Amino acid sequence: MTNEIKYFSRSASELPMIFQFLNTVIAENASNLKILNELKLSVEEIFMNMVRHNETTTKDIAIRIESYKNSISISLIDHEDNPFDIVNTDEIDFDEYFKQKKYGGLGIHLIKKLMDDLIFDHDAGKTTIKITKHIN
Amino acid sequence: MFKIEEVSQNEIKLIGEFDASQAEIVTDFLQRYEVTLTLDLEELSYISSMGLGILVKNYHRLNGMGYKVILKNLNEHIKDVFKYTRLDQLFVFDE
């Protein structure tokens, strides 16, 4: 089992370093590029949501990767008082989405489709969003 | 690493990883085109939801002018992203 944590400042320019962190830790346990890309997409979506929608702190965002024989879990941890629970969001009405010519807001839907588990937790001013993907 | 290249007046190639940090570059690049546009994704290894949003925004912009956006050479990850968001019903695929 691998358990590593790193801290990233609140900027889209951190994404290459975050992907490098994922590449290094995950590649040791899962050589499947498709799984790696699914994890990257989910981490980017959660990270960018924290950067864009939480203006109450300037503290770094922590990313913890736990890699097991048959699964990989990644937790993103942020400091906030009024969290947004991404687990309890409405399903997208795609007919309406296309009719209104929308072009954003697909990220959470994608995480739910691509990941095997998604957990939201908020305690003592800290939000933790944990995604899990089964490898085999 | 990410690159965007013009193949011809109506075809461009996206190369590498299209994440949120590339949003402004791609938005500015695509804005110049007012034609039926082909996007060659053969060397695009990764796209995020923000990247997807930029492609959809340009689809609506060009579609409003009577043009199409044609996608070709998608890898498995990118095909899945289009399938799960039902955007495979919106774009034209040249397979």
Image: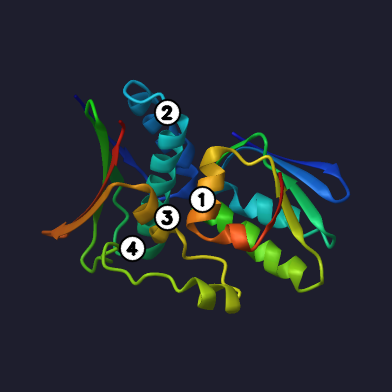
Q: Are marks 3 and 1 in contact (CB under 8 Å)?
A: yes
Query: Compared with residue B25, is residue B63 higher up or lower down, i.e. above or below?
Result: below
Residue A92 in percent (x, y) is at 43, 70
Judging from the image, mark 3 belongs to the subunit labelled: A
Q: Quadrant of residue B72?
A: top right
Q: In which quarter of the image is residue B4?
A: top right
Q: For mark 4, what is the residue?
A: A54
Of tags 4 and 1, the one toward the viewer is 1
Q: How far apart are marks 1 and 2 (CA)?
A: 16 Å
Amino acid tagged 3: Leu
Amino acid tagged 4: Asn
* The disc label shown at residue B81, or none: 1
Judging from the image, mark 4 belongs to the subunit labelled: A
| Mark 4 or 3, nearer chain start | 4
Residue B62 in percent (x, y) is at 76, 66
* Secondary structure at numbered mark 4: loop
Mark 4 vs mark 1: tell me if same chain.
Answer: no
Amino acid tagged 1: Val
Mark 4 vs mark 3: tell me if same chain.
Answer: yes
Q: For mark 2, what is the residue?
A: A32
Q: Quadrant of the C terminus of chain A?
A: top left
